[in-house]
Every structure is written in C-alpha cells, then in structure tokens.
Image (cartoon, rainbow, N blue to C red):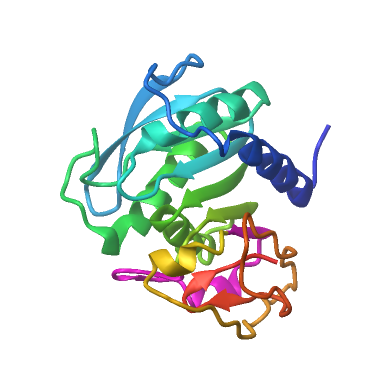
C-alpha cells in the first residue's frame, strides 16, 4: 500500500511524540542496526547506524550536545514500522571524524540523504532536533525530499541560516517547539510575525508541545525560533 507523503509524515510525527519522554539509550543501538560510515562532499567521514530496510528512508539528525545515540530508540520504532533509518553523528561528534563545525553540518545531512539513496530508498524524510533541524531545513530547500520535521530548531544556528530556505521548501513540513525555548535562546518575551507561505502552500497547523507564543498567524516565529502550524 502506498501512502501520500503527508500521511507518512503524520505516522512519523505520532511515533515521535510517543518517544519524546525518553529519547536516549545506553543499551547500544539494538534493532539489528548495522554500523556504517560515509563521506561528505568536503571529505569528512561520518559514522552512524543503519536500521531496517525498505524503500522509504528517514534521516535522523541530532541536537547539540547530543549525538546519534539520542535517536536510537526512535530509530528502532521506525524500523519496526518498515522504514529504513540512518542515525549518525555530525562531524566532530562521537565516532565521526573532523572537527565540530556547525556552519557546515548541512553537508552532513546531505551526505546522509545520499547514503540512504545508495541503499535503494525512493522516498526520504528528514527529522532533526535543534541544530539538526536547522541543517535539515537547508537541505530540504535544495533536495527533493518527501517531508521534514524539526524539533525546537532555531532559524539560525551559528553560521547556519535557514530563514530564507524555509520559504522555498516544497515538501510537507512540521516544526515543533515548546514556549520555554524562547528563554533558552535568550529571549525574555515572545512575539509573532507573519512568515512567507511556501510556494505550494503546504504548511502544517501550529502544533506547540507546551505553552507558546500566540499561534494566531499561519506560521509564527518566536524571534528566530521556528514554530509550526
């Protein structure tokens, strides 16, 4: 049975909410995962684990200061649902080579997408937390992906700036964040402003995970923090 991208994104989101209370593991990747490595366009070797098989792939990109381990429980859930999943370390993190370089981690997301496609997937979804979400948005603006989900992803993360990229993403998308993120970004009060609607108009409803700024506009932004609608 073939699903529309939006339906697949819904399944991913429901599973993600179920895993939010506990998203780390000290028991190893489990799930029959295979340790893999692949190279970025600028020659950095990244390390990760590949879960499952199938024609629909999911790239899981971690937050700072976490690493791929934070995604292992969710990767196992997706594997059991028939997805082929890659959880990996950004450059300079855990088992990946190179130096930590947040300005270029979108290249790492792209390399993970290319790796999954080399394994035979025909559809790719991106899920990223914090800086991993920002990098995923940049890749989704250029790459033909089937959906993108971000968790508490700032529109800017050091040298990464996804403010313009998000306006041209044609794939279904979901941005999730809690109101408390405003304070963690050094913002004492929240404000909203209208954000341009993507060219195909497929923008999700606001789905705050806790108290948030007013969701009155189609795609509110909390002073740099991307919210979903």
How far from the left and from the top, in percent, is residue 140?
A: 53, 60
How far from the left and from the top, in percent, is residue 77?
A: 60, 26
Tell me: residue 16, above or below residue 210. above
Residue at 69% across, 77% down: 199
- The part of the image, by quadrant, that contains residue 70 is top left
The answer to whether one can see residue 122 in this image is: no
Residue at 35% across, 27% down: 36
How far from the left and from the top, in percent, is residue 132?
A: 42, 53
How far from the left and from the top, in percent, is residue 9?
A: 70, 47
Tell me: residue 79, above or below residue 16. above
For residue 84, side relative to residue 64 (left or right): right
Confirm whether the magenta stretch covers residue 216: no
Q: How many marks?
A: 0
Tell me: residue 64, above or below residue 225. above
Name the outermost residue toward the right: 1
- The part of the image, by quadrant, that contains residue 56 is top right
Q: Which residues are magenta?
A: 155-176
Q: Quadrant of the C terminus?
A: bottom right
Name the outermost residue toward the bottom: 193
Tell me: residue 197, above or below residue 26. below
| Nearer to the camera, 91 or 220 | 220
Residue at 53% across, 66% down: 141
């Amino acid at each position: 049975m073939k699903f529309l991208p939006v339906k697949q994104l819904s399944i991913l989101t429901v599973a993600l909410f179920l895993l939010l209370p506990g998203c780390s593991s000290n028991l190893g990747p489990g799930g029959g995962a295979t340790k893999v490595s692949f190279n970025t366009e600028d020659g950095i070797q990244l390390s990760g684990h590949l879960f499952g098989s199938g024609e629909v792939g999911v790239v899981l990109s971690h937050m700072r200061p976490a690493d791929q381990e934070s995604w292992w429980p969710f990767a196992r859930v997706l594997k059991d649902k028939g997805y082929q999943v890659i959880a990996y370390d950004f450059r300079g993190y855990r088992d990946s080579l190179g130096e930590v370089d947040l300005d270029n981690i979108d290249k790492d997301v792209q390399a993970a997408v290319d790796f999954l496609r080399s394994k035979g997937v025909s559809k790719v979804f991106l899920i990223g937390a914090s800086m991993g979400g920002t990098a995923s948005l940049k890749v989704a603006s250029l790459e033909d992906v089937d959906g993108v989900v971000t968790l508490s992803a700032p529109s800017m993360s050091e040298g990464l700036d996804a403010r313009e990229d998000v306006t041209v993403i044609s794939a279904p998308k979901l941005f999730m964040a809690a109101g408390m993120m405003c304070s963690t970004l050094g913002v004492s009060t929240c404000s909203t402003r209208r954000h341009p609607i993507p060219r195909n108009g497929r923008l999700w409803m606001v789905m705050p995970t806790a108290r948030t700024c007013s969701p009155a506009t189609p795609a509110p932004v909390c002073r740099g923090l991307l919210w979903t609608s």
